[in-house]
Amino acid sequence: MSAASTGPGSPFDVTLEEMRLHRSAKWSRVKADVLPAWTAEMDVRTAPAIAEALHTAVDRSDFGYAGHPKPVVDAFAGFARDVWDWDPVAGTGSVRVMGDVGVGVQEILRAVTSPGDRVMLNPPVYLSFYPWITGLGLVPDDVPMLDQDRGGRLDLEGIERSLAGGTRVVLLCSPHNPLGMVTPREDLAAVAHLARAHGALVIADEIHAPLVHPGSERQFVPFLAVSDAAREVGIALHSPSKAWNLAGLKLAVGVVADRSRWPAAMTGGLDWGAGILGQYAAVAAYTGGREWLDVVRREIEERAAQLQPLLAEHLPGVRYHRPSASYLAWLDCRELGLGDDPAQAFLERGRVLLSPGPAFGPGGTGFARLNIGTSQELMTEAVRRMASALDR
């Protein structure tokens, strides 16, 4: 077992019995005989710096409404400067705190669109984008990713046609979920140029940005750092929720390059949606949680590599392109003969829960998303259960 593999002291040193005690959505919303490998939560021990910060909040009995956002803003800005060479508060840059990225996306859309407006997506893409958009009376305008089998790339010609046709907003997923693709700077700059030319807004969901794999040939570039056009048309959304496994603590940040670019109609009470424990945890994550994150990133990268021989052994009909970011594996199961939604067959016959490919929009039929943010043992068990679905 290599140094990065699951072992004593590893954040992924968890057992099935321990995880069954969790009340999080991933583990509590499944039956006792089902192994969950679906929603984007990791099976991981909390970073010591975050645990210490939360214990401090408990010791202080500090459970009121979230306080002044400055400590969070300063911590995030320091992390962004050190890791991505991007200063989100430089000049007239502005960072706002909110409950989560989903709230941010929906509040921005509510402020800048009217029912019937089109919002462009690049499917297969994060499945919650669709209900967020349709719930506001908006229309998804799908411009599917190209070259899925090679990791994916944006269809810039398709994006231009969409914008020329009147699309008001580009909802960009960068790094991309579920493909794990890190968008190159030149493609981000092209999107920004096209959006400015057509008077559109770009909302960049960059929630998986801290989880780019150490060995990736391409590193994450913040959308607001790529060009003047991007700074004019973009709003970026970040959160420690994925990288440090803190979704339930409810804390995200939105960034614009000039505070005057916040949509005027956005509610002034957005800050009140954040949780005070989220504030404690975010400051600790961005300042004291970096070493822990580096270990997690190395182990996720190793888990992505381990998945390839596992599939070759147990599910040779499944095609899989290793992601460059995050802990989500996009599996092409079309050769298995399990229909449009293979995740359903894996659940019914194998008692393992994956995310259903069709929910990710066009290009998702016959696919399923597997969460590999877990121990090697639990990932192996998930694949074995998937294989057992073919035997039944």
Image (cartoon, helix red, strand yellow):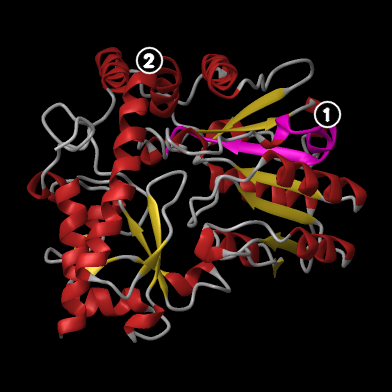
Q: Which residue is drawn at 52% across and 60% down?
A: 150
Q: Which residue is drawn at 44% across and 50% down?
A: 323
Q: Nearer the viewer, residue 386 or 273?
A: 386
Tell me where the magenta segment starts and ends, as one range: 224-241
Please provide percent x and percent y for residue 284. Answer: 39, 18
Q: Which amino acid does label 2 sit on?
A: Gly
Q: Residue at x 31, y 49 (%)?
A: 305
Q: In which quarter of the image is residue 276?
A: top left
Q: Residue 260 carries which label?
A: 1
Q: In this view, does 258 lie above or below 250?
A: above
**Is residue 228 a member of the stretch shown in magenta?**
yes
Q: Which of marks 2 and 1 is in front?
A: 2
**Is residue 151 a member of the stretch shown in magenta?**
no
Cβ atoms at labels 2 and 1 below 8 Å apart: no
Q: What residue type is labelled 1?
A: Ser
**Could you tell me which secondary element the residue under label 1 belongs to?**
helix
Q: In this view, does 220 lie above or below 172?
A: above
Q: In this view, does 174 lie above or below 169?
A: above
Q: Is residue 107 left or right of residue 24?
A: right
**Could you tell me which secondary element the residue under label 2 belongs to?**
helix
State which quarter of the image contains the C terminus.
bottom left
State which quarter of the image contains the N terminus.
top left
Label 2 Cα crowd, 10 Å radius (few <14 / some 14-19 / many 20+): some
Residue 127: tell me if it is visible: no
Marks 2 and 1 sit apart, C-alpha to C-alpha, by: 32 Å
Looking at the image, is mark 2 or mark 1 earlier in the sequence?
1
Q: Residue at x 25, y 71 (%)?
A: 315
Q: How many labels does the image show?
A: 2
Q: Mark 2 points at which residue?
A: 288
